[in-house]
Structure formats: structure tokens, C-alpha cells
Image (cartoon, rainbow, N blue to C red):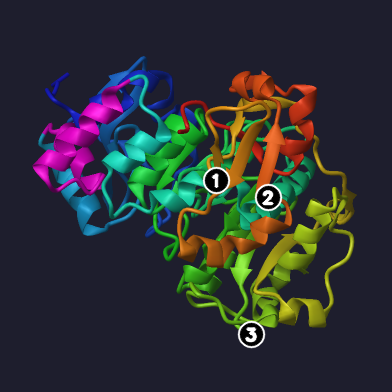
Amino acid sequence: MPSSSGSASRSASASKREHTDVRDGTLDLLRCPYCGGRLELVESSFHEREDGEITNAILGCHCCVFPIVAGIPVMHLDPAAVAAREQIEAGRPDLAARRMFALDDEQQAARFEETAASATATYREVVDALGPGFEGGYFLYRFSDPTYLVAEAVVRAVAATTLRGGGRGLDVCGGSGHLTRSLMDLSSPAPVVADFYFAKLWLARRFTAPGCEPVCCDGNAPLPFKTHAFGFVVCSDAFHYIWTKRLLASEMMRVAGDTGAVVVTHAHNALQWNPSAGMPLPPGAYRDLFDEMTPRLFAERTLLGEIVAGGPLDLSQAHGTAALDADLALTIIASRRADVWRPYPLEEPSEARGEFRVNPLYDVEPDGDPARLRLRFPSEDYEEEYGAARLYLPEEVLVERAAIDALPSVRLSSGLTSLARRRVVLDLPKRYY
């Protein structure tokens, strides 16, 4: 099999080999978004395998050919994807990866490849290496955003119901996998995260949700998955940016199946002003899109209040028109299952999926006992959009120095349990910052 030197695809995956390849189960899920046909490996084209799994290759159907780059199927025909496919066909997976990472500058590409090849590189360092055009700041602080608190609680509640006994989850427009991570212990097989931006998917697999199945695709086109492939489908903080909302809603319901659930969280409300509005709809229009799957709508502000108060998260009744119309963002849950509609107790933090660490929004003074932690928003724009975090994030907190010095840890000391409830201490992926 041909090999390549200086390969971005090799260096970017070297420290996480076990999570870099396309698995047979993923290929079985895939369908062409344009003709609906199955995808098969084009054996006559350049391809690489590692331990029997596909790393770089070409997939073909009745109408199209698509590249697999650094273990990620790229199921759209954007110019970068076409260029990457041509580089794979030419036996240059290193250049294919550069195109998908949008690394057109040689110096920046070399910096990224060096950082990505390091086994000790952090999420923050790799994001910085991707350059100023990458929206890394938003993702770094995602785990304590108010929008994330609501999304995670809803996802954990509904997915635990519909995936009980086995079933796969799908995170549509999932970015770098923050919500995908919430599905890792609920989804069997591993959840799929789908997004248009290749670099975000690579970050999800490398750092945020190791073991997930990434697929690069366009949310404005049919989803590249077979019908009824999933038991739970979520789209968070993205649906209002999709132009073809009717298509995406229909596709989410198609792949979820009759016994699954579809969840849309933080959908901007057209009746209220939003600094990053996108193309929002009013509550009734969101409901109509999912009408065939008996949807219920919830005001995000109300759900956040239930979470801050310690629960339960009450999904037994849809919220009223006045609450929905007045809220900036909505949660839509669609399912034919009666057992979805109930109150859910909130999970108590105990053992970390990754490791407990101080929230990166806090500065920790280096001296003194107790240690002083001060809340610092990274920018005025961030504070304007996520200022509701002050409902649970204190401006300042004093903590025993020994408890702080014991972090990172897998288990919480008794002195940090209340701070974990308030998101001052977070369960973060390893090597996050």
C-alpha cells in the first residue's frame, strides 16, 4: 500500500490510533445524500488501512465518490471536499487533510501538524494551532454555558429512555462533540457526530468524545444515513442556522425511527431579538415541522430554572404559549413514546467521565489558603450572550487549597461537591486545557 511522508492525516491521529479509523458499522450506516445508495470502498483507488479499518480511501455509490480523510468520511461536495478527494486519489492523504483542515498557509499547516502529533497537546493548544479563524473560544467554555446545561440535561434524560436496552445516538451539527460526549455511555454502538466542519469532528474524536463516530456532512442536504438507523437524534444550537429546516426536520425523524426521539435544543425564537439570530422561526412553526412525531415545546428559561434549582427536569407537559413566545430560545422534543413525557431527577456529579477540574472561566489565585477563585468572562460579547451563567456561577468563591491542589481527579472530594453542582468545578475531557 502506498505511504506518504509528513502526512497531516498520520500526524493528526498518531496519538489516538484506536479512534481514527472508519469502522465497518459506520460504513453500514452510510447512504449517499444525493441518490440514497449504499457506499462501498473503491478498491482500485488509493486506500490505507490500520488494523483492518479504513484510514484514507475513496467511497463510491451510484452517482458520486467521496473521500475518507484521516478516518472521517466526508459526505458532501463542497470544493474543499472535492479537492481532498482528488488528493486521496493521487495518493496524498497529507494534502487531503490540509484541505479539510483549511490549512492553506504552509507555516500554519506545519504548526498545526507539529501540535497535533504531540501526545501531550491539549484541546486548547490544538484549537490555537488551527488559527484565529477557528471559533475555539466558544467551544472551550461550552461545558458551563447555560445553553449547554439545558441541552445536556434534556439529552441525558430523553436518550436514557429511548436508548435503554440498546440503540445508537446521533448528534447533528454536533461541532466538536460536547453533547456527543453526553451520549457515550448511553449509545450502543458508539454515537455518531455529524457536522460540516471537518476540524471540529477531528477534535471531537481526539479530545471531547473519544470513541465516537464522526461523519462530515451538510445539514442543508439529506442526512447520509439509512432510515431508522438511530434511536435518538439531537441538534443543539444550530437548527436556526439551517436554511432547509423542513428537510432537516424530516431527515431527523426519518433516521430516528418510530420508537426513537428527536430533540432540538436552543432553537432561537423569531418572536424575540437575538444577537446571533440566524434564520429563526416562531414557536408554532417549529411545532409544525415535527408534527408527524407529536412534538412538545419547552421554554429554555424555564428548563434552566429547574436545573439551577436542583430539579427535577419536568418534561411531562409542554409549556404554555405565553412562556414560549416570551423566551429567547426553545427546546423541541418529538417522540411517539409515552415514557418520554415525565419529570426526570438530575444526575449528581460523582465520578468523572474525564477528570474534574476548575472551570476555565475562573482564575485561581496562586497563593493563600483558602484559594480564591474569580469569575472572568473571556469577552464582552461572550458575557452578553451567556450572562445567564451568573444564575449559578458565583463571582468569587473560597476553596480549601488542598482540595484545589488535588485536581484533576476522577472523584470529587466532599469539599468540591457543591461547586460541581454550580459548575465551578467541571467534568472535562482529559487534556482539555
Q: Please state the extent of the stretch shown in magenta in the rendering.
A: 91-118
User: Main SS type for the magenta part?
Assistant: helix
**Amino acid under disc 3:** Leu
**Labelled pair 3, 1 in contact (Cβ < 8 Å):** no
Dot 2 amino acid type = Leu
**In this view of the protein, can residue 309 be seen by the observer?**
yes
Mark 3 packing: few (<14 Cα in 10 Å), some, or many (20+)?
some
Q: Is residue 96 above or below residue 335?
A: above
Sooner in the amino-acid sequence: mark 3 or mark 1: 3
Q: Is residue 287 magenta?
A: no
Membership of 94 in magenta stretch: yes
Distance between the alpha carbons at the discs numbered 3 and 1:
31 Å
Q: Is residue 296 left or right of residue 140?
A: right
From the image, state whether disc 3 or disc 2 is nearer to you: 2
The spot of residue 311 in percent (x, y) is: 86, 50
Circle 1: element type: loop
Nearer-N-terminus badge (1/2): 1
In-image side of 72 versus 260 (left or right): left
Q: Could you say where residue 375 lies in the image, as x and y percent from the top left?
A: 59, 48
Instruction: Looking at the picture, tell me which residue is in the foreground, 119 or 332.
Output: 119
Q: Quadrant of the C terminus?
A: top left
What amino acid type should be assigned to the residue bearing mark 1? Leu
Viewer-side residue, 241 vs 430: 430
First in sequence: mark 3 vs mark 2: 3
- To which residue does mark 1 refer? 361
Residue contact between numbered discs 1 and 2, judged by CB atoms under 8 Å: yes
Q: Which mark is residue 385?
A: none
Task: Quote the CA–CA distance across marks 3 and 2.
Answer: 28 Å
What's the residue at 50%, 50% (across, down)? 174
Question: What whole-number distance in Å separates the C-alpha atoms at marks 1 and 2?
Answer: 9 Å
State the residue lying farthest toward the top.
Answer: 51
Residue topped by disc 3:
271
